[in-house]
Image: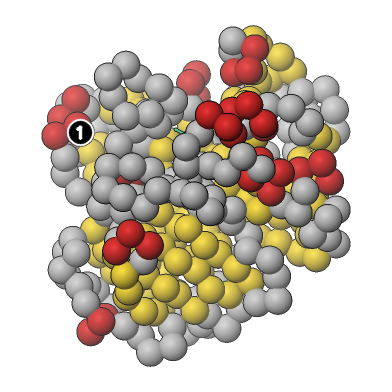
Amino acid sequence: MTTGKGTDWDDKFDIPGRVRFMEGVGDLPMININTEWSSAEVYLHGAHVTQFQKKGEEPLLFLSQVSRFAEGQAIRGGIPIILPWFGAREGLPMHGFARIKNWELREIVPSKDGAIGLRFQLPDSPEAGNFPPFTADYIVTVRDTLSLELIVTNKSADQELSLEDCLHTYFTVGDISAVSITGLKGVDYLDKVENFAKKTEAGDAIKISSEVDRVYMDTTAPTEIHDARLKRKIRIEKEGSASTVVWNPWIAKAQQMPDFGNEEYQRMVCVESGNVGKNKLTIGPGKSASLKVKLSSTTL
Ligand code: BG6
């Protein structure tokens, strides 16, 4: 099924029992998806997946109880799309402008096997004028797993397009002290907590007991979050991504963030997949780059 552009949709695009258009928090337009295995919610604001939950399991994605849901502000939790830059840029929004734009819903694709696919496109905006012309499409596929694909296409005839992208996935965990993250042993990273000091991951498993903000470089490996409290293993598989970012703000930073509860650092961890810093993308004229992430979970 193909929808109209922009917010030019209403409940005539509903697929009874499977796809429902509704007003979400802050009256922002939201799409509720149900499959035989799972449910999900996606806001047009940022094309932001705020929820994915398998039947009989805790929510996979963490969403702050005090998140803002407002134009011009990023939602805290779920999956913010970081594009076309990662981190701070003087005078410009942190982590790029894609996460605070209202994306256009272009297509809804129900599969015979019961999966639901949604395709969004980033609208034109003045901020994009600082880059060669490009389009960004985002495909969200909901089944027993959650699959995400961000495709950036350089529309210029003669200029290279250089940018960063990242799917900033926030995961729910039972208790951060019972979590270990595997898949990054031997990988070099920049430690943002220590002024971008370059280090190498030594351990088989990363444990978090203080602020962690690390950009792992040149790694295409899948990662896993082992959660002994929720008795769950989350697997993050990726393609077209050379960077993995691991983030937990811990106590002091949590207290500084107005849209994040003081205790919420105990119930989340971000393991992000993208192409940032030295792994930034360079896309030739007329070419595309695809970043794919597949999230799955199993009971331990
Ligand atoms: C992480 C960065 O990806 O995102 C952190 O590495 C940053 O440095 C965090 O604090 C959250 O950013 P924001 O803009 O959503 O508060």
x and y percentages locating residue 188 in the rendered image: 68, 20
x and y percentages locating residue 29 in the rendered image: 29, 65
User: Is 27 positioned to the left or the right of 175 in the image?
Assistant: left
Q: Please tell me which residue lies in front, 37 or 112.
A: 37
x and y percentages locating residue 85 in the rendered image: 37, 28
> From where the camera sits, is residue 157 visible?
no
Residue at left offset 15%, top offset 30%: 129
Estimate how packed mark 1 is, as few (under 14), some (14 to 19) or many (20 or more) residues with alpha carbons within 10 Å. Answer: some
The kind of secondary structure element at disc 1 is helix
User: Is 20 positioned to the left or the right of 171 in the image?
Assistant: left
Residue at left offset 30%, top offset 36%: 97
Against 205, is 197 above or below? above
x and y percentages locating residue 280 in the rendered image: 44, 25
Disc 1 residue type (three-letter)? Ala
Residue at left offset 41%, top offset 69%: 117
Q: Residue furthest bottom?
A: 16
> From where the camera sits, is residue 117 visible?
yes
Q: Dividing the picture into quarters, in which one does residue 124 lie?
A: top left
Residue that numbered label 1 is attached to? 128
